[in-house]
């Protein structure tokens, strides 16, 4: 680890409404041709300097050694053997079995024998019998869409899965392409079942850890800007997923922007729809270890499945792919001018800070791998790209992690963001200075000029007056 990175980390001061239908949102037309070879424009620190220290997955404490003071293993922890990666992980202390717990902090697992139907009968035998009948029809090639619809919609225990029926209804062509991605996944796993572990982690930032932005002395993090790379193609970093507060957004409907596409090329992420509730402003969801199965072309209305993808990413000692994704939801602005209100700024700052907050690893330094993001909350959510860039730079700087900004096909943003970053770095700007810029912009300008233009004409020294 370089001294420069250590010095940055020593500056950390830890104390210091759902979008409307995505089909109706205005999508950046440049992304419709996102399959075309983009110009390879890059700015800032070299990408390798950010990711080189994290080429290997962050090591975790073995599951059976994890402290249990604040949580309970509902199912016995797993032991993954790297030397035998083809063998399915098995539970440690298998005989201890499943803990059927229900209280203020734990929700009974769907497999609990205590679940009953409205007539107090266990539903599992009934579900099993119906699935057996459905399988017989499938084997005989007699199953119809109506059979599938009845099987899914007849059980109130599967509310989220029933939304998958929308994919089979009439609608735009991207529905077919999303189905091709999902069906390709099932084809792959029937040919060879993958082994390993996937983690879905809901994280809530305690109020005691909320930063005081106006007083933060954290220096600006290193940044790398690129217009030729997609977020999912940059490895060895935390990949931001531009989420709806109801995770998955329109993936089971007509939606086909960043979140929905990611869930289609990595279908294991769809499990989160079953277990993750609406996110609060101080919450995010980590999806760790999900494999990518499909390639794709383009975006939104022109999205296309583009064949198989071989995910050769290494696994950590839990058996998880070295793929850490964080789902973080931005605010939706029917009126874009509302985003220039400090109440909304504070909300998105808290969301980004929560999502970038380093999580537990075996060694503290291993938790500070870079963050790869882009125009979060823009496009379908009507956010200002420059505004969101400053917010994410502040959050990454506050937690002491480098920022990789993938503004795919947006040459103007790469150049203008880097010019602003150089200007701020030349004045030795701190996070608190950026917060003052946002405050001043919200209160003292008619906002006809962009936040980048405002910063470039306003010395930091003038903010203190």
Image (cartoon, rainbow, N blue to C red):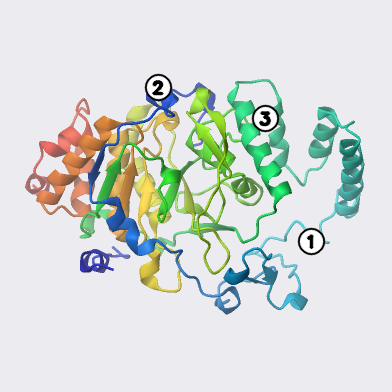
Residue at image coords 55%, 47%: 310
Residue at image coords 65%, 43%: 185
Q: Nearer the viewer, mark 1 or mark 2?
A: 2
Question: Residue 210 at x, y = what percent?
Answer: 36, 59
Mark 3, Cα crowd under 10 Å, few <14 / some 14-19 / many 20+, is: some
Q: Which residue is mark 1?
A: 112
Element assignment for label 3: helix
**N-term mark: 3 or 1:** 1
Q: Is residue 44 above or below residue 82?
A: above
Question: Residue 36 at x, y = what percent?
Answer: 40, 27
Which circle marks residue 29 in the picture? 2
Q: Which residue is mark 3?
A: 167
Mark 1, Cα crowd under 10 Å, few <14 / some 14-19 / many 20+, is: some
Which circle marks residue 182 in the picture? none
Question: Residue 199 at x, y = what percent?
Answer: 58, 59
Q: Can residue 71 be seen in the rendering of this structure?
A: no
Residue 181 picture quarter: top right
């Amino acid at each position: 680890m370089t001294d420069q990175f250590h010095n940055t980390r020593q500056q950390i001061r830890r104390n210091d409404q759902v979008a409307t239908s995505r089909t109706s949102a205005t999508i950046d037309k440049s992304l419709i041709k996102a399959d075309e070879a983009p110009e390879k424009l890059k700015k800032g620190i070299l990408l390798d300097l950010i990711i080189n220290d994290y080429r290997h997955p962050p090591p975790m404490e073995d599951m059976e050694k994890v402290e249990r003071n604040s949580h309970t293993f509902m199912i016995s922890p797993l032991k993954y053997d790297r030397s035998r990666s083809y063998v399915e992980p098995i539970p440690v202390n298998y005989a201890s079995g499943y803990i059927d717990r229900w209280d203020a902090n734990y929700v009974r697992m769907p497999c609990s024998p205590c679940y009953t139907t409205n007539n107090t009968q266990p539903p599992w035998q009934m579900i099993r019998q119906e699935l057996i009948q459905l399988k017989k029809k499938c084997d005989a090639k007699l199953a119809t869409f109506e059979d599938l619809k009845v099987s899914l919609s007849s059980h109130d225990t599967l509310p989220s899965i029933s939304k998958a029926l929308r994919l089979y209804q009439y609608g735009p062509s991207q529905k077919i392409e999303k189905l091709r991605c999902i069906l390709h996944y099932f084809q792959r796993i029937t040919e060879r079942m993958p082994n390993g572990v996937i983690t879905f982690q809901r994280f809530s930032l305690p109020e005691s850890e909320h930063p005081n932005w106006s007083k933060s002395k954290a220096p600006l993090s290193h940044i790398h800007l690129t217009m030729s790379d997609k977020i999912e193609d940059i490895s060895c970093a935390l990949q931001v997923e531009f989420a709806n507060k109801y995770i998955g957004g329109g993936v089971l409907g007509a939606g086909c922007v960043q979140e929905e596409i990611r869930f289609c090329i990595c279908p294991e992420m769809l499990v989160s729809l079953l277990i993750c509730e609406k996110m609060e402003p101080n919450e995010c969801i980590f999806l760790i270890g999900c494999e990518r199965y499909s390639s794709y072309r383009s975006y939104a209305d022109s999205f296309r499945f583009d064949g198989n993808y071989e995910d050769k990413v290494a696994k950590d000692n839990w058996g998880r792919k070295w793929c850490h994704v964080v789902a973080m939801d931005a605010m939706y602005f029917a009126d874009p001018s509302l985003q220039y209100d400090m109440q909304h700024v504070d909300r998105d700052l808290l969301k980004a800070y929560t999502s970038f907050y380093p999580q537990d690893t075996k060694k503290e330094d291993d938790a500070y791998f870079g963050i790869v993001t882009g125009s979060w909350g823009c496009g379908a959510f009507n956010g200002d790209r420059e505004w969101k860039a400053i917010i994410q730079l502040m959050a990454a700087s506050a937690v002491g992690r480098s920022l990789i900004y993938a503004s795919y096909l947006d040459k103007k943003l790469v150049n203008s963001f880097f010019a602003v970053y150089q200007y701020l770095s030349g004045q030795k700007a701190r996070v608190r200075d950026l917060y003052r810029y946002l405050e001043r912009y919200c209160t003292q300008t008619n906002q006809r000029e962009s936040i980048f233009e405002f910063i470039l004409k306003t010395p930091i020294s003038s903010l203190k007056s």
